[in-house]
Image (cartoon, grey):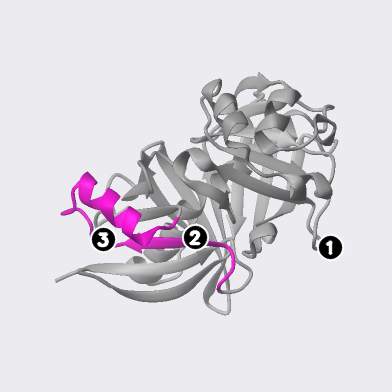
């Protein structure tokens, strides 16, 4: 007997957009090595494993694997796996599903439209702000002129469970111009905890969106990711901390993946609390593509 297999598109406005995800159910019998091999076989940026159909310690035990390693947290796997749990394990409308991940317990809340899950929101852990980087170093890694970087704001590592180097760019043309220079990229990440670079600007392809973004992760074999929930959570915290949009609270739409033909839409909410901490939530839609069995 095999394992339940679900294929989904996450942060997608329609099927066959957004970021692809494979979810394997009832996976407690699999070893970490087997999970890693399955993730490589699937060849998506991440694959998740629901260990049991049972609710344990207030949530569902889930493990996330990239092509190279197990991750304590990742955005679109968290959202997509919560969708699978609601649709196929719980099989009724619920307000919230909690996932027990390496980073801790992450709650995912649901809204519904015509009885189907509409927008899913995941609340991320409190952000941490790390090292800052010189524009010339980052420009060399991205094959762009340093003048394309918006130097009114810092280039900085941010983490809400997974660290990213957040890079503010001056225009959509600057975002489009980015390509990874391997030598420059390796030099940059050698000085950083984060291995992924996330660029953004306040110009967009689609009216109604406020931010365009791209994510590069050559270190883990991902040339470019179409939708990155964890990075967008870091971006949300960054926008609030530095008052990028002039306010200590945001509620906005981020487009990603347009440059690689996988248009994605991520919804961000973040606010600075009375204690100075920044609360972050990332939302979007999930579409089921296929179900089957992993033999």
Sequence-wise, which precedes: disc 1 or disc 2? 2
Q: Is residue 97 above or below residue 157?
A: below
Quarter of the view holding residue 232: top right
What's drawn in magenta, residue-wise?
16-44
**Closest to the observer: 11 or 270?**
11
Q: Is residue 221 above or below residue 263?
A: above
Does the rendering let one see residue 15?
yes
| Helix, strand or loop status at disc 3 | loop
Q: Is residue 23 magenta?
A: yes
Q: Identify the disc placed on residue 207.
A: 1
Identity of the residue drawn at 77% across and 34% down: 248
Where is residue 188 drawn, in percent x and y? 60, 26
CB-based contact (under 8 Å), mark 1 and mark 3: no
Where is residue 287 drawn, in percent x and y? 52, 71
| Helix, strand or loop status at disc 2 | loop
CB-based contact (under 8 Å), mark 1 and mark 2: no
Label 2 crowd bin: few (<14), some (14–19), many (20+), radius 10 Å:
few
Label 1 crowd bin: few (<14), some (14–19), many (20+), radius 10 Å:
few
Viewer-nearest of discs 3 and 2: 3
Q: Identify the disc placed on residue 95.
A: 2
């Amino acid at each position: 007997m095999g394992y339940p297999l679900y294929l989904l598109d996450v942060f997608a406005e329609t099927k066959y957009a957004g970021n692809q995800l494979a979810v394997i159910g009832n996976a407690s019998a699999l070893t970490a090595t087997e999970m890693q091999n399955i993730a490589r076989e699937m060849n998506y940026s991440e694959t998740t494993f629901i260990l049991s159909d049972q609710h344990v310690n207030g949530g569902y035990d889930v493990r996330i694997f990239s092509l190279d390693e197990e991750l304590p947290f990742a955005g679109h796997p968290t959202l997509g796996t919560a969708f699978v749990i609601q649709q196929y394990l719980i099989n009724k409308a619920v307000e919230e599903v909690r996932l027990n991940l390496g980073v801790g317990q992450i709650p995912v809340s649901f809204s519904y439209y015509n009885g189907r899950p509409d927008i899913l929101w995941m609340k991320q852990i409190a952000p941490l702000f790390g090292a800052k980087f010189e524009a010339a170093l980052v420009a060399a890694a991205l094959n762009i002129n340093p003048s394309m970087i918006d130097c009114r704001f810092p280039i900085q590592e941010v983490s809400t469970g997974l660290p990213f180097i957040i890079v503010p760019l001056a225009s959509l043309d600057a975002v489009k111009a980015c390509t990874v220079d391997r030598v420059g990229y390796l030099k940059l990440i050698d000085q950083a905890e984060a291995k992924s670079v996330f660029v953004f600007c306040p110009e967009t392809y689609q009216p109604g969106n406020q931010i365009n973004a791209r994510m590069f992760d050559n270190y883990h074999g991902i040339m470019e990711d179409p939708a990155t929930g964890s990075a967008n959570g870091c971006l949300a915290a960054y926008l609030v901390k530095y008052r990028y949009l002039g306010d200590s609270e945001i509620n906005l739409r981020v487009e990603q993946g347009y440059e690689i033909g996988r248009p994605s839409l991520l919804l961000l909410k973040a606010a600075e609390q009375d204690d100075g901490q920044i609360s972050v939530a990332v939302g979007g839609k999930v579409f089921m593509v296929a179900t089957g069995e992993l033999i």
